[in-house]
Image: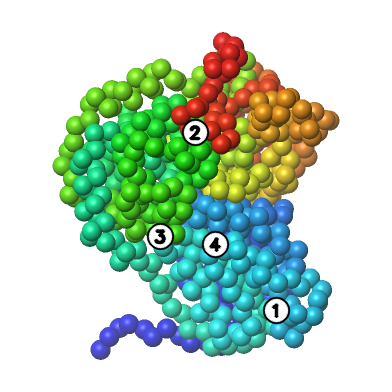
Amino acid sequence: MSDTKTPETRIINGSEIVVECLKEQGVKTVFGYPGGAILNIYDALYKHQDEITHVLTSHEQGAAHAADGYARATGKVGVCLATSGPGATNLVTGIATAYMDSIPVVAITCNVGVSLLGKDSFQEIDILGVTMPITKYNFIVKDVTKLAEVIRRAFTIAQSGRPGPVLIDITKDVTAADCEYTPMEPETVQLQKGTILEEDMETALELIRKSSKPFIFVGGGAVLANASEELRTLAHRIQAPVADSLMGKGAFDGTDELYTGMVGMHGTKASNFGISECDLLIVAGARFSDRVTGNAQKFAKNARILQIDVDAAEINKNIRTDASIIGDLKVVLRKLNAHLDPMNHDEWIAHIERLKEMYPLRYDKSVLTGPGIVEAVYTMTEGDALVCTEVGQHQMWAAQYYKYSKPRTLLTSGGLGTMGYGLGAALGAKLGCRDMGQPDKVVINIAGDGCFRMNMNEIATATRYNIPVIQVIINNHVLGMVRQWQTLFYGKRYSHTVLNDSVDFVKLAEAMGAKAYRVTRLDEFKEAFREALELCAPVVIDCQINCDDKVFPMVSPGAPIQDAFDDTDLKIEVK
């Protein structure tokens, strides 16, 4: 006779079903903001606060970004909640951010009762219609008997294949209605293997074996697939240099001898020139963003292109390929590695090394700069921090000058380019590290002053819960990246990009309960950052830099990536 107990069926209301299903999925932390339509669920969360931690953010957008950061840092599904109407619509930017970067998030919103739908009721919005283009799938639940099934499906969909956000909208009457609930074990998400065709594998192996100048380009899909070890094996087995996209950072060790840096608009010249000269480009989980390819007609024109992706829709979407393999990247790379013997491309690697020596990243070390700050952060954290960023110049400096040796250590908005993303994501990431048994992981958000203004209210969230994130503001008193374009391409017409007003970030941070510093020199920054590492509390460091500092190298919009230029090409003196 079996000792296995049959799961107990109980009669509970819809709100309790939501909480029980979250517990089934192993959810430990959720982010949100209550309101009238979702009050029943918040009442249930109150009763289960010892099992699920709810973090009240300062704004629903902060909750969405926190859920996103939690997911990126842990590899698990992030969860956010909001009420109907403006609560739900305030999640939209965060949902779109997750969608563009293929991040598994489940957003739970509540709506007016079924009898009030479609009547322009108070705080009613068709959130399904609003989010349909920016979710992997979305649901509205009008029948409590369907609620548990929908929540379980949402978590499976968010994680399977190419990950992405899923929205569940629940009418208020469903959250109050009673229903039978039977616990279930969460469905195991299977890796996508059935689409890996033998003929595609053979074609790929033939291309690799015939190549004399192979190059590997790594995208965010490699991070999501946890394929770092397989990538390292492939690169060293076929002796190929490796570049990454912004989203691919950390999938391949940034300190590895084969690593050449980021590729694209602000990629290194070694990466851009190397990809332009290679005879085979192996693309691992990248979608050929326009910021990577530059002029698509001239991208990697000397190369055969082999693209490996879990999503068939990415093949030939932006760049025509010569061969492709559809399937989970980790599985595909394992299969390729099993059939490849070690290869020798010493002459090609020596050429790439010369490019790296000829075109190093460089900046003015006599004054406080973004690159200098990022390098100091890298040195003082020994390369073992989790770095979040907002979007702009500081984001590119964080990508260029911090060496990411592990995946899930750079969290940034790539596809949507969301200003205001980083601080909420940092809060989510820090709590995710706690839930994963790494409570002492150093989490830093690097922001520009323009980005920090957008969601700086989340400093209040950090202090309310004593979430010890370090907020570094690269403050040039302008919208730096936009100003850079205005300088280079718009005749220095600085239309609405100057932020030289009376806003004092130190006083604002202190008013919200954080420790804050203002620094103007690198030694001052190092001292402030050292104290921040020791404090184990929310800290804001306002770093004053020159408004005309620029991100180099750069590729002009529409130009091929081999036309990358820097300050030397423009005859701008840098000491």
Q: In which quadrant is the C terminus drawn?
A: top right
Q: What residue type is labelled 4?
A: Pro
- Report how far apart the C-alphas of labels 3 and 4 lie in the structure: 19 Å
- Residue 144 visible (yes or no): yes
Disc on the earlier residue, 1 or 3 = 1
Label 2: which residue? 560
Circles 4 and 1: CB atoms closer than 8 Å = no
Near-viewer residue (226 or 565): 565
Label 3: which residue? 312
Disc on the earlier residue, 3 or 2 = 3
Q: What residue type is labelled 1?
A: Lys
Q: Which amino acid does label 3 sit on?
A: Ala
Q: Which residue is drawn at 48% across and 87% down?
A: 9
Q: In which quadrant is the N terminus drawn?
A: bottom left
Disc on the earlier residue, 3 or 4 = 4
Task: State the mark number for residue 260.
Answer: none
Residue 75 pos. (x, y %)? 45, 55
Label 4: which residue? 165
Residue 212 pos. (x, y %)? 24, 34
Q: Residue at x 45, y 63 (%)?
A: 159
Circles 4 and 2: CB atoms closer than 8 Å = no
Residue 325 pos. (x, y %)? 32, 55
Near-viewer residue (166 or 303): 303
Q: How many marks?
A: 4
Nearest-to-viewer mark from 3 and 4:
3
SS at badge 2: loop
Label 1: which residue? 172
SS at badge 3: helix
Near-viewer residue (214 or 49): 214
- Report how far apart the C-alphas of labels 1 and 3 lie in the structure: 38 Å
Q: Residues within 10 Å of mark 4 (few under 14, many from 20)?
A: many
- Report how far apart the C-alphas of labels 4 and 2 lie in the structure: 33 Å
